[in-house]
Amino acid sequence: MKAVISSTGLWTPDDSISNDELVEAFNAYVDKWNAQNAAAIEAGTLDALAPSSAEFIEKASGIKSRYVLSKDPILDPDIMAPRIPARPDGEPSVLAEMAVAAARDALNRAGKSASDVDAVIVACSNLQRGYPAIAVEVQALLGIDGFGFDMNVACSSATFGLEAARGLIYGGQAGSVLVLNPEICTAHLNFKDRDSHFIFGDVATAILVEREDIAPDSHWEIIGAKLVTQFSNNIRNNFGFLNHTAPEDDGFHGERGRKGLTDKLFVQNGRSVFKEVVPMVARLISTEAQKLGLDPNTLKRLWLHQANLNMNVLIAKKVLGKEVSTEQAPVVLDEYANTSSAGSIIAFHKHSGDFADGETGLICSFGAGYSAGAVFVRKVGQTQ
């Protein structure tokens, strides 16, 4: 029995930060830091911090804004980090609340209810805790019988989760699986780092994967998928329960990792990532398409991971052998920034409504690990 994508869902925070707003806060911090360290800078023992600009950010990444859960503290030059208060154990966690909202959107779009679901997978980069699993909490909040588990493959978590759901269906463990991707990426971002302070945003997406015989008439056949990983330190996040020492903690994000422990936050060697990931992903797509007997040029759309516009442009060009328009490789990172595992799913969610029966596309993720996932899909039936 085939496993198909019945629907997707999206939850977006209310607050957004534009590049201009982010740069104003960052430059205020830079001016203050340079003034406080003027003597050391003059003596040559410290380098002055350089200001940023909206033009630099857009040229480097294609990002123009990002949605966030905690706007004001991020824009406060004395804080420059989200502040998300801790909740009592009896209340829903922040991550579960986001995931439930996206899940309900996906269920509504498919005309389904929680009682139709057998399993929940929370697949994301930034899990709020080790246990109990966020997925099991979501399962309880939605009232789903069955089981749930969390998984993390960084920015490829959604595509890996999608393939895991497909395996559960083929193995008879479930007939309907919710794959949820709640991402609070700003909690792991160093907003005082000029080279990366603009990269991430917060969001949650959902994918409803079901047996073909119980799916809506209008759905997405999964033609084939390929997952790969290759170890690299070029994108790294060391923060975890073994890797923080600051006792202060005023909430879920609190002061942990902010008291001189910036090495525990997101770091990357951007040039190496670009140089190594682009050919890896292009090769993955081309090789798998050939195995499936697909000409990449017959793909109506490439829903690529939303990390960097220049990377996406080059990957699409390598795969298709030509310049590709945003019509064929849509961009959402200008509005959402990099939302890790959720990025390609946002692109798919927002830019798939014009597909006719039989038309094909590609959902593709790539990121830390390195990890990459390519999922080829074909539209079945007419979009409602």
Image: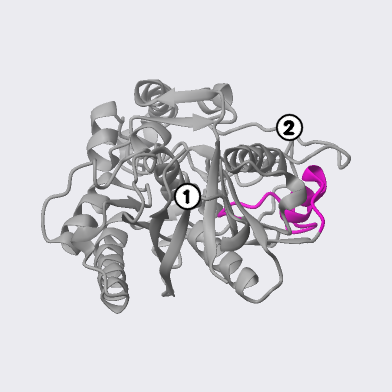
Q: CA distance from mark 2 to mark 1?
A: 23 Å
The mark nearer the N terminus, 2 or 1, is 2
In the visual, does 226 lie left or right of 75?
left
Numbered disc in front, either 2 or 1: 1
Residue drawn at (45%, 61%), measured in percent from left and top? 221
Q: Which residues are magenta?
A: 123-145
Residue drawn at (21%, 67%), measured in percent from left and top? 295
The answer to whether 122 is drawn above or below residue 194 in the figure is below
- Residue 296 in magenta? no
Q: Which mark is residue 281?
A: none
Q: Residues within 10 Å of mark 1 (few under 14, many from 20)?
A: many
Q: Position of residue 99 (x, y in %)?
A: 65, 43
Q: Is residue 156 visible?
A: yes
In the visual, does 104 lie left or right of 324?
right
Residue with the most extreme right position: 90
Q: Position of residue 11 (x, y in %)?
A: 57, 35
In the visual, does 260 lie left or right of 240?
left
Answer whether labels 2 and 1 touch (C-beta < 8 Å).
no
Quadrant position of the N terminus in the picture: bottom right
Q: Quadrant of residue 318?
A: bottom left
**Secondary element at tag 1:** helix
Residue 140 or 106: which is nearer the viewer? Answer: 106
- Tag 1 residue: 340
Q: The residue under label 2 is which amino acid type?
A: Pro
Q: How is the image coloured?
A: one colour
- Tag 2 residue: 85
